[in-house]
Image (tube, rainbow, N blue to C red):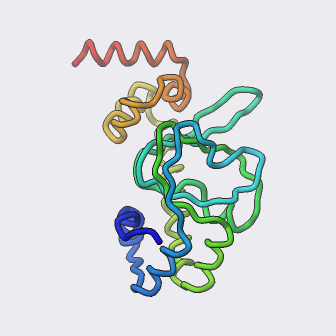
Amino acid sequence: MLLRHHFEHVCAFAGNYNIHFTPDEFDMIRTHTKCEVLPAHTVLMEQGKKVDKLYFLNRGIARLYRVHNGVDHTLGIVSSHYFLSTPLYLQSGEISTCSLESLSEIDVLIWDKESALYLKKHIPKMETMDLAVMDTLLKWLQDIQINSICMTAEERYVHLMETQPLVIQQVPLKYIASFLAIHQDSLSRIRKNLTQRS
């Protein structure tokens, strides 16, 4: 059974939505949760296939991406304590429209479909937890969309520097350029201009 410290970040996430579990509920959750450390470039969710696991990122960096007409597009980069994949896809059995991979070694909590459904059946507040996960995902996607429309590539890069410094330090430039929807040469020029102005 996992120790309490494995759940520190996910409990903080739940607390932000005023979701608190009793000791008995917490023990049930611990029994149905796995924790794994996975290497970089582990595919967690695959485009065109059913989602079979729900992940919570305790440590590390992951990216959401989609391959369209043979081109790999980075849709988002996650370096904070977020859920990866969604309970909606896990429970519905729908085909995923995107892929998810680790960009660094990651430490994740894992629930397979059977465990997720068991917890939802026996802990009613898991319904509220599902809504919290979807709310967070919606806000994250909305922020990305608004920034892509309202900000220049340089402004988005600066925003990334300020909000996710680990991404700037550890993620290969090709993924950052893809996320900003610019060529890698353009990203190099942005980085050079910022360095000259600082």
Residue at far front of view: 1
Please say whether residue 195 is visible from this viewpoint. yes
Q: Nearer the viewer, residue 106 or 125?
A: 106
Looking at the picture, how far across and down is residue 29, in whole percent?
50, 76
Look at the image and tell me whether residue 139 can be seen: no
User: As drawn, is 171 to the left or to the right of 32?
Assistant: left
Front residue of 146/170: it is 170
- Residue 40 is left or right of residue 15, and the answer is right
Q: Residue furthest left?
A: 198
Q: Quadrant of the C terminus?
A: top left
Give me the residue at 77% from left, 46% from top: 48
Instruction: Please state which of residues 179 and 119 is positioned toward the viewer in this rendering.
Output: 119
Q: Residue at x 74, y 66 (%)?
A: 92
Residue 86 quadrant: bottom right
- Residue 125 image point, x, y percent: 51, 82
Q: Position of residue 52 (x, y in %)?
A: 69, 59
Identify the residue at image location x=48%, y=60%: 136
Q: Position of residue 154 (x, y in %)?
A: 40, 25
Q: Based on the displayed image, in which of its 4 quarters is residue 122 positioned?
A: bottom right
Q: Is residue 59 above or below residue 17?
A: above
Residue 53 drawn above or below residue 27: above
Labels in figure, total: 0
